[in-house]
Amino acid sequence: MDAGLALFWRCCSDWFTISIHLKQEKVEHMLQLAGVTHIYPNETRALDGVSLDIPKGMYGLLGPNGAGKSTLMRSIATLQTPTSGSISFDGIDVIAEPEAIRARLGYLPQDFGVYPRVTAYAMLDHMAVLKGIAGTVERKDTVETLLNQVNLWDVRKKAIAGFSGGMRQRFGIAQALIGNPDLIITDEPTAGLDPEERNRFLNLLAEVGENVVVILSTHIVEDVADLCPRMAVLAAGQVQLEGAPNELIASTAGTIWEKTIPRAELSQYSAQYQIISNRLMAGQSVIHIMSDDDPGEGFVSVAGGLEDVYFTTLAKTRGNTAAAA
């Protein structure tokens, strides 16, 4: 009986040790960037000391056009080498071992070229060959599985030239998924999509992102708010803000104020307050400002959203940049 108990507890101990080891491996399976800087030959500093620790799952990278997002994505995807800093993924030095990371990478750039007169099936088959899937049977299984996964099977024999924007993006994610990559980078993937295509595409990304690292680089706040457990705001080549969207939204509680004003008065309010967002509704301007105290003047306190967090961060960045100049 005692021997049996001893064996039981030994098995429990072994299981616990294995579980801890697996959890540690799971935590280590991530993308780490430290002090990544990139300066172009014309002296433009696109990235300035970017440091991020990106876990498994969907990760949102928000930023306006020109913030450095595409430069950062290209650096992670080994398409260019940063001026300084380090990038590692699951123990791989991305800069020193680009071939090692390419074997585990799926990349959907903002604009990707295809042969427009080639069918979706033939093009994906060709890309699978380029990705190293040489076996005919394995490649056939891969292509057919991906076309079904992105809901393009029914148009597999159609030339890509006849695809809608959403269909092209779904084809783009299909090619990014060839080889079951552990790291997937998408750069502005929903730009130009209609609402239905956007929802379908984001649902697909969310399904894929359950077990791998997926970076969603975008300037569309709703995409990040809907999908990403963690996010960062990149502006002026630097990480201005990082954290969980819900926590960042909670940090603005009691500080966001709203007022509806005539459009003609917008310039007057802009001179008096730092307006963080402005949208038209029924011919009038709905403005948001941030203030720790009640600003009066008919402003009402409202629950902030991720858009308020984002625009406030951009406003502070512009203010700091202007002050430094």
Image (spheres, rainbow, N blue to C red):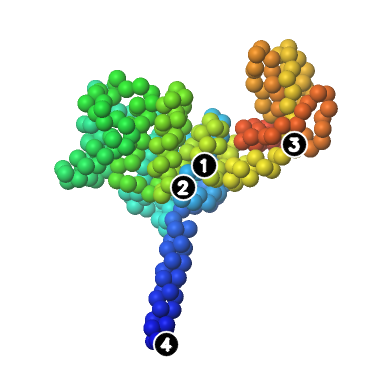
Which x, y percent locates residue 245? 59, 42
Which x, y percent locates residue 191? 46, 27
Q: Which numbered disc, 4 or 1, marks the residue closer to the eye? A: 4
Q: CA distance from mark 2 to mark 4?
A: 45 Å
Q: Give SS at disc 2.
A: strand
Q: Which numbered disc, 3 or 4, marks the residue closer to the eye? A: 4
Left or right: 168 as drawn, with respect to 299 = left
The label shown at residue 255 is: 3
Residue 123 visible to the viewer:
no
Q: Does 311 appear above or below 240? A: above
Q: CA distance from mark 3 to mark 4?
A: 64 Å
Residue 36 visible to the viewer:
yes
Amino acid type, label 2:
Gly
Q: CA distance from mark 4 to mark 1?
A: 51 Å
For the residues bearing labels 4 and 1, Cβ distance under 8 angstroms: no
Please give the residue where the numbered disc 1 appears in the rendered image.
228
Q: CA distance from mark 3 to mark 2?
A: 31 Å
The label shown at residue 273 is: none
Q: CA distance from mark 1 to mark 3?
A: 24 Å
For the residues bearing labels 1 and 3, Cβ distance under 8 angstroms: no
Q: Does 99 appear above or below 14? A: above
Q: Label 2 neighbourhood size at 10 Å, few (<14), some (14-19), many (20+)?
A: many
Amino acid type, label 3:
Thr
For the residues bearing labels 1 and 2, Cβ distance under 8 angstroms: yes
Please give the residue where the numbered disc 4 appears in the rendered image.
2
Amino acid type, label 4:
Asp
Q: Which numbered disc, 2 or 4, marks the residue closer to the eye? A: 4
